[in-house]
Image (spheres, grey):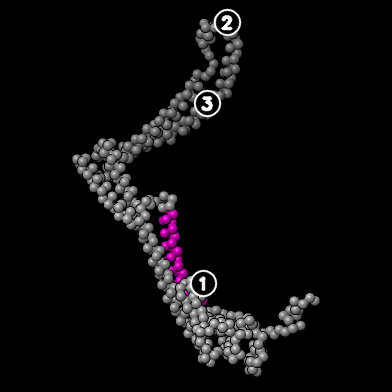
Amino acid sequence: NSTDAINVLLCLFNHHNEISYFQDQLKSAKDKHSAFRTAQKYNFIASAITRQKEYDEAQSKLAELRQEKEDLAFSNNSSVDTEEVKKANQINELKRYLRDARKKLEQKKNDIHLVDLNLQLGVQPTEADLNNLLTFFPNANIEKLTKIEKFHHKIQSILKDELLETKKRMEQELIPLQSQVDKIQNYIEQLKPSMAFSDEFLTAYTKLDHEITTLENECDNFINLQNLTEIKKQARKALEERTTLLLHQMEKSINDEMEKISDFISHGEDNAPILRLLKSNSYTFETPRDSGTGTNYKGMLIYDLSILKLTPLPALAHDSLLFPNISDENLRQLLQLYSTIRGKQIFIAFDRQDNLGPDISSLLNNHAVIKLGPNDETLFGIQWGKKI
């Protein structure tokens, strides 16, 4: 496409590094802008404000909230230190954590106590238990019951090891729970707020503070997005401006060179082809007032030769189908021009040696690498299109 073609031309004129710097700047700006918008899309950052009108309304709301917060602080009959409010809220939060931690700790202690009871009491009844049973059931088979309880005792012996292992594991689980309770208590003692606040004041003050912080973040994010958008815009503009400057420089160099080559080929009689590099993705190429097939082919040959001369391009190749529509005189001049170029390689396939004069025939023969013809003079000694 046109963009790729012009990029190739920029590279041929050794402008790649210069352009790539601006391209990298634009890519970086695009990536940052896209990342920020994606974070907003998935609510990783506040994004409620999307228009300038909403931003202006948010600024007015912020002024109201700040005034309301100031009035609330004044109603407390003392200057309110925001850090002390944070400490008080933090202590309340820690106290909730402490209640939960103590509850888990007591539950674990109760579980250990139940295991201890199982280990201490077991399941075998005492003699007193059996006598009490006879009081209510005189005909009970005590002997049989005793045998059953002896069996239970054997089971108890087997379970004892498992109970001991369970107790050991639960005692290990008790350690981090106790440690957590101790840490929370230490945090609470270390904070020690110097100001006392009622729960009602803390709730109202914290709510206002949260609303202000949220709105400030939304406003900041709106400004950040505006800045990222502007940076992307400026990066694109810088790339376009630099590219346009380089395109104009290349356009002039190529057109000047094509003018020289055209004057040589046509003895200064024909218009030279003109290249217009309009943008980084758009160009035109034409010979003024002449759109004939021969002129179009000649224009392309002239363009190729100008690029060969102006850039590090080491070689070019022109196939035989490019020459038939060019006049004999122009063709004579073109072939002579090919032979004058040094330090580069030019490959052509040519089949119009007749009618160009002995000097051109000699020129072609002197430069020929391979000459092809019918039968044994074919490229591989065989004409592939023949049945046999």
Residue type at numbered disc 1 = Ser
Left or right, residue 167 beside residue 315: left
Residue at figure coordinates x 74%, y 83% from the top left: 374
Sequence-wise first label, 2 or 1? 1
Quadrant of image for the C terminus: bottom right
Q: Secondary structure at mark 3?
A: helix
Q: Quadrant of residue 183?
A: top left
Q: Position of residue 136 (x, y in %)?
A: 52, 7
Q: Are marks 2 and 1 in contact (CB under 8 Å)?
A: no
The residues colored magenta run 12-39
Residue highlighted by disc 3: 163
State which tag comes first along the sequence, 1 or 3: 1
Q: Is residue 185 above or below residue 282?
A: above
Please name the residue that numbered disc 1 is placed on.
Answer: 2
Question: What kind of element bears circle 1?
Answer: helix
Q: Which mark is in front, 2 or 3?
A: 2
Query: What amino acid is found at the position of numbered circle 2 in the picture?
Result: Asn
- Assess disc 1: are there few (<14), some (14-19) or many (≥20) residues with their C-alpha within 10 Å of its C-alpha: few
Which residue: 51% across, 72% down? 2
Mark 2–mark 1 distance (CA, rounded to whole Å)? 110 Å
Q: Which residue is mark 2?
A: 139
Q: Compute the Cα span from label 2 to label 3.
A: 36 Å
Observer able to see residue 63: yes
Q: Nearer the viewer, residue 317 or 329?
A: 329
